[in-house]
Amino acid sequence: MEFKLDKFQEDAIKSLHENLNVLVIAPTGSGKTYIAEKAVEKYLSEELNVIYTTPIKALSNQKYNDFNNLGYETGLLTGDRTIKSDSSLIVGTTEILRNMIFTEDKRLEDIGIIVLDEVHYLGDSERGTTWEEIIIHAPKNIKLLCLSATIENKSEFLDWIVSLRGPTKLVESNTRPVPLDVELVATQKNHEKIYTIKSTKNNKNKRIFNFDKKYLNHKKPLLPNQINYLDKNNLTPTIFFYFSRDRVETKARQATSTRSRQRKNDELKKIYDEVFKNLDNEEYNLLNLDELYWMWSRRIAYHHAGLAPIIKEFIEYLFLHRFIDILFATETLALGLNLPARSIVIDAPYKYDGVKTRLITQSEFLQLTGRAGRRGIDNIGYAFINYDKNIHTHWYDKLFTLKPNILNSSFSISYASILNMINKYEVSEAIKLINESFYSFQNKYDTHELEKTFISKLQVLKDLKYFESELKQKTLTETYRDTFIPGLEIIENGKEIEFYLMFLCTGLSKSKQEFSINEKYQNIYTKYFVIQEEINKLESFNNINSRVTIDISWFSIFNEYLIKNNLEYVLNKFNLNIGDFIRSAKEASELSLKLYNIFNIDEFKQINKLFTNKLIQKTML
């Protein structure tokens, strides 16, 4: 071993060898992954299998590569990708593991430990329930290794795990391996020199930070000046975080236009040609490779969810291997991917969270600043926040404490989870298990509303005769898409492929876009909508507040693709980013295969083939 272990790593590894559950809370980049690697080594040496879960597919792909590079025969299960699914070490998303637990997958019999990376996702409003269901329902003989950088109420979270899983060791570290300097920076109206208003090196506010006459003279630094400042002070590679795709692209173009082409680009060109050599002209243009290479050859790039997966993977590779100095990115880059920089810059701390525009939370701030400082390379990492006169100084004071937010449960009851519970437990036992949730633990076991929701939704399922139909049950339990319910009431009446495509689209993740439906297909949609209203009446009668609603936004897009089989035409017609199309196309591909296996309806197989386009499936894996 070439490096000395930190005490928290020693303690965690010792606890693993004592066959304890382990909860590790330590800053990003401090070496939590090494603990997971030692857990894998221990359990595989004992001929027990390991499941390593992550919240996002990109992180699962990265971990899959990492473990393969360490010499382990590793499987990958992310829904849209299945590789060596019977391997002793499986990397996958939490949803895959949750489904394995409820279906009592035989592979669980040989599992020694489950690694829950980024376990603070348990607080996510849309997906957090999945983490709780795993911790509650995983066989009790399986140990857990939970990893996170951002949990303030760690003792409370530990006590909950102990109440369910038995002896659990909390191992924590507050020390970053690379110290972090956070600076609030600004310029004056009549002077472009960047200066620091507030820094973690000096926690007391400077006088100019108070509300006095000088307050009016502060302004946000201009991008060219900021890049020049970073270059002059040897603070690159840098990640500029913006909470808007458009701003990420615009700022990257702005920065590139003032930067000259690098002289030594031979190695970049060689890697570029290797990855993209098999593309035809149409695919090349769709990926916008001319402009992207123009940026990359000047050591600048941008990264957001609207890019094609192959482009995102390539940019991540370039950044990790030091081909990029300045990376403009949305916060999706900070979600666990191992892409450290010497410095990060937060242009404006406002983000739209799907409901409203708000200031980022302390945990989100820690996630972003976690990218700053490369272990073994940098002595210190830098995080710069651009000053905004509209933000009260108390908000900055709170942010500079570098403390995460309290982790709160987002546990909810879905129709799919009820069916899974009833298939595994008696009704009375299933209701009791609600009391084992972190939500119950945090609310002093007051689960009256959750139990009421469970009973009400169970009654709706009975009224809809779900317990008399194995097909209906399997559709929900294997897809976890409650929005399929209206379509399941009429699926036997389907005749044409458009009917099944619309049914599939009701199960896709919600789209931000809304597209009108061609009159030709309005009658199909009307059938769905009428059934939805009938189900909503049932839900209302049973006092259920959150009603089933269908969203077929992707139907018009995918139907056009079905007709034309021309990706460029569809993207232009609907003004879509290729990454958004590919993400939903992969989800549709995964779902259509599941639906074909459940119903044995050939149209679902045809839909699945629709998304086998090499550009949709292309990856660096």
Image: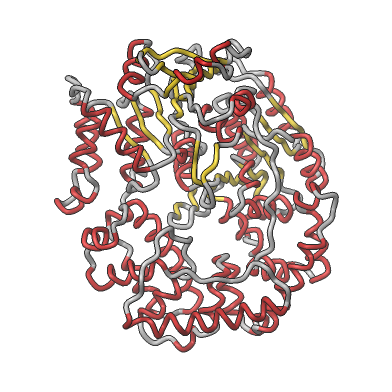
Farthest residue to the left: give it: 281
Residue 409 sits above or below residue 318 on the image:
below
User: What colouring does the structure picture have?
Assistant: secondary structure
Q: Is residue 443 left or right of residue 385?
A: right
* In front of the other: 257 or 310: 257
Q: Quadrant of residue 27?
A: top right
Q: Is residue 374 left or right of residue 174?
A: left
Q: Is residue 574 left or right of residue 187?
A: left
Residue 140 sits above or below residue 99 on the image:
above
Residue lying at 19% horizontally and 25% vertically, measured from the top left: 265
What quarter of the picture does the N terminus occupy? Answer: top right
Residue lying at 47% horizontally and 61% vertically, measured from the top left: 510
**Residue 251, horizontal then vertical, whole percent:** 31, 33
Farthest residue to the front: give it: 213
Residue 530 sits above or below residue 323 on the image:
below
Q: Quadrant of residue 50?
A: top right
**Residue 211, horizontal then vertical, whole percent:** 57, 19
Work out whether residue 179 can be spotted.
no
* In front of the other: 505 or 205: 205
What quarter of the picture does the C terminus occupy? Answer: top left
Work out whether residue 25 can be spotted.
yes
> Total of numbered circles in the picture?
0
**Residue 387, horizontal then vertical, whole percent:** 48, 24
**Residue 541, horizontal then vertical, whole percent:** 71, 80
